[in-house]
Image (cartoon, rainbow, N blue to C red):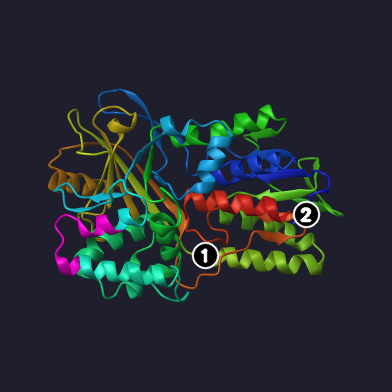
């Protein structure tokens, strides 16, 4: 970390996704001169807007994957407010709800934490007293231990004493939505950290915040305007193919910078570093090579979002949980009513976390699931498969650090930090990168 009296830096940020734009905002706020390089013609990275057309011919802004925020995403919400995003208009806030179409499931009441959690568990619809008592004991035990556990423990192992209903209707949906990794392979320590912040750690942390605008509008575009208004630069359609080190500085496309933050996906960062490493002195090349090896070792999970439409389709609430089983004709875990969230009436978004299978098969399975569980006959609008959506958040996983080498840093949802591959994880890594310069 630099001393407060140090002079401002010329900083290059490669990548204008959520992590890159968060780093840019944080760096400009700290007084640095920032230039953002982005290979595509739009900001947002994987969490960006996509043009689409509903089956009635109406144009609509979709997202490259349906995302949600929660009240515990304190750093994301702080930066959104800083760049002028009207939170109350942009996000639909409602209590933590994991209800199914038949009305069964969990809903936390509007009470202060932890009373909302305790009352919500005790009043879960369709659960027997054994389900509630077992979960209550487990949650109180996790709280007693500070929502901490051995790093090598899986979520399934952590929850082995819970009933099948609680596992199927609460733990599995929460785990796969937060970590995008099924519970037998998911890190219990990361799961507990998110659960602790959401249910007990932050006032209002459990509230669901559903975007009413597309993901590009929600933060990256506002951040880009804020950046330019304060003298920063953003160069869209400018793919950085090579980094060059000159003494203690870095050169990108003829410009000289003091520091560089790689805010790309892990694979793109590794490619840049592989080209750079042979030209570096041995003492610097070694940590850079180690960072690349850690990033290369990451495994990834896919997320599929199926957008479907029917003229009269409307859910009982903006988001419903779905009964899901991997490898079956019911792959989706959640469905969102985009018509209740500022989109066209009748448009639904089905999310298949940790998805497996090819595009057409998943789309057909989701349409069958909608008919079976929601009683809706829908037409497919668009299906988005993000094959490397998130890293697999497995027990004991070693994630690459923020610092790559002298003057060279990384941020992104895969970089080491307390959160899984979420928008909050990306934003927190960006803040950490700027603080570490």
The quadrant in which residue 256 appears is top right
> Does 120 appear in magenta?
yes
Q: Which mark sits nearer the N-terminus, 1 or 2?
A: 2
Callout 1 environment at 10 Å: few (<14), some (14 to 19), or many (20+)?
some
Relative side of 186 to 19, left or right? left
Which residue occupies the foreground of this view, 330 or 141? 141
Q: From this viewpoint, is residue 41 visible?
A: no
Q: Is residue 49 left or right of residue 355?
A: right
Where is residue 27? Give x, y as percent: 69, 43
Disc number placed over residue 414 in the picture, else none: none
Local secondary structure at mark 1: loop
Number of numbered callouts drawn: 2
Secondary-structure class at tag 2: loop
Return the residue at label 2.
Answer: 2
Q: Which residues are magenta?
A: 118-131
Can I make out residue 144 in this image? yes
Residue 157, percent across and down? 34, 75
The spot of residue 266 in percent (x, y) is 57, 56
Which residue lies at the image location 49% right of the left edge and 73% below the top edge?
396
* Circle 2 residues within 10 Å: few <14, some 14–19, many ≥20: few
Q: CA distance from mark 1 to mark 2?
A: 30 Å
Answer above or below: position of 351 versus 345.
Answer: below
Q: Is residue 123 a member of the stretch shown in magenta?
A: yes
Mark 1 lies on residue = 298
Q: Nearer the viewer, residue 257 or 69?
A: 69
Q: Residue at x 17, y 70 (%)?
A: 130
């Amino acid at each position: 970390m630099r001393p407060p009296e140090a002079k401002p830096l010329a900083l290059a940020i490669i990548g204008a996704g959520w992590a890159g734009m968060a780093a840019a905002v944080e760096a400009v706020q700290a007084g640095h001169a920032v230039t953002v390089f982005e290979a595509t013609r739009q900001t947002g990275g994987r969490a960006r807007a996509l043009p689409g057309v509903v089956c009635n011919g109406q144009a609509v802004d979709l997202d490259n994957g349906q995302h949600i925020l929660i009240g515990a995403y304190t750093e994301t919400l702080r930066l959104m407010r800083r760049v002028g995003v009207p939170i109350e208009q942009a996000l639909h806030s409602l209590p933590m709800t994991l209800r199914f179409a038949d009305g069964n499931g969990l809903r936390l009441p509007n009470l202060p934490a932890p009373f909302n959690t305790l009352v919500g568990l005790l009043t879960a619809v369709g659960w027997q007293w054994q389900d509630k008592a077992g979960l209550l004991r487990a949650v109180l035990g996790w709280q007693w231990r500070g929502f901490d556990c051995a790093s090598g423990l899986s979520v399934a192992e952590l929850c082995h004493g819970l009933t099948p209903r609680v596992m199927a209707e609460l733990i599995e949906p929460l785990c796969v939505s937060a970590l995008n990794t099924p519970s037998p392979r998911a890190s219990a320590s990361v799961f507990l950290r998110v659960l602790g912040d959401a249910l007990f750690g932050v006032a209002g942390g459990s509230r669901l915040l559903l975007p009413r605008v597309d993901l590009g509008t929600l933060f990256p575009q506002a951040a880009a305007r804020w950046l330019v208004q304060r003298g920063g630069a953003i160069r869209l359609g400018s793919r950085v193919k090579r980094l060059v080190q000159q003494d203690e500085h870095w050169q990108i496309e003829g410009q000289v910078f003091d520091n560089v933050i790689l805010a790309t996906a892990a694979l793109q960062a590794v490619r840049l570093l592989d080209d750079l490493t042979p030209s570096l002195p041995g003492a610097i090349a070694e940590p850079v090579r180690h960072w690349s090896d850690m990033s290369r070792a990451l495994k990834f999970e896919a997320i599929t979002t199926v957008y479907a439409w029917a003229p009269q389709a409307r859910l009982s609430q903006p988001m419903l949980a779905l009964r899901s089983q991997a490898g079956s004709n019911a792959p989706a875990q959640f469905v969102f009513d985009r018509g209740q969230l500022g989109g066209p009436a009748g448009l639904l978004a089905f999310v298949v976390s940790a998805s497996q299978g090819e595009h057409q098969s998943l789309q057909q399975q989701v349409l069958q699931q909608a008919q079976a569980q929601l009683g809706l006959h829908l037409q497919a609008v668009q299906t988005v498969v993000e094959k490397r959506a998130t890293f697999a958040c497995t027990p004991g996983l070693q994630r690459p650090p923020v610092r790559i080498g002298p003057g060279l840093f990384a941020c992104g949802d895969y970089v080491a930090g307390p959160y899984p591959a979420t928008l909050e994880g990306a934003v927190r890594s960006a803040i950490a990168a700027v603080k570490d310069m």
